[in-house]
Amino acid sequence: MIQVARTMLIPCPMPDAVVYLADFTHAQEWDPATVSCVPLTPGASGPGARWRNVSRFRGRTSEVLYTLDVEEADRLVFTGENSTVLVTDDLRFTPVSDESTRLTYTASFHFKGIARLAAPFLRKDVNRLADDVASTLPRVMVR
């Protein structure tokens, strides 16, 4: 398993940040690896909502089906899965002021099958991806 965590200051009120990030379609805006992200449950929001995310990682494109598992006032948890990986994205929000929010974003990658053998070699690339998200997401969240 590889786990990465980044804490960032988001320049918008906490309720706005939670609502924006609860719609995983927005990953196209804040995750530089995301090529596309489309809802599989149009019009639905909240726990159980699902998306098809296509990402580019290490030059390869892969599709992961994501589900929103937890939606609380200060926390979102998504799980994504395909044949080689189970991903958990745990987003925790803390108000800093009326106009800013601290976001702690933890992503856990549980590789399956033969992909488990590659996990030690992927850590550097996963860390780079986490750094890219931490750099991009606050800029996108300017409201």
Image (spheres, rainbow, N blue to C red):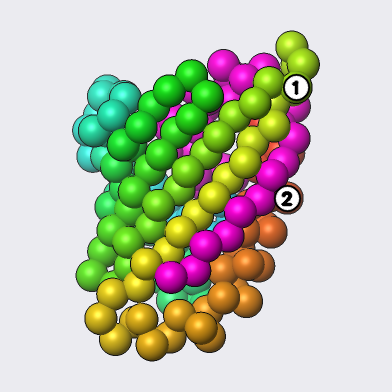
Amino acid type at image mark 2: Ser
- Nearer the observer, disc 1 or disc 2? 1
Residue 8 can be seen in this image: yes
Percent across and percent down for residue 141 are: 67, 31
Question: Any magenta on residue 5?
Answer: yes
Snapshot quadrant of residue 69: top left
Residue picked out by circle 2: 135
Q: Is residue 143 above or below residue 55?
A: above
Viewed as shown, does residue 10 lie left or right of 91? right
Magenta residues span 1-30
Q: Is residue 37 above or below residue 73?
A: below
Residue at coordinates 67% horizontally, 57% vertically from top-left? 132
Q: Which mark is residue 25?
A: none
84 or 58, nearer to the observer: 84
The location of residue 24, given as percent across then percent down, is 42, 38
User: Dot 1 corresponds to which residue?
Assistant: 96
Q: Which of the 4 image quarters holds residue 114?
A: bottom left
What is the secondary structure assignment of the residue under circle 2? helix
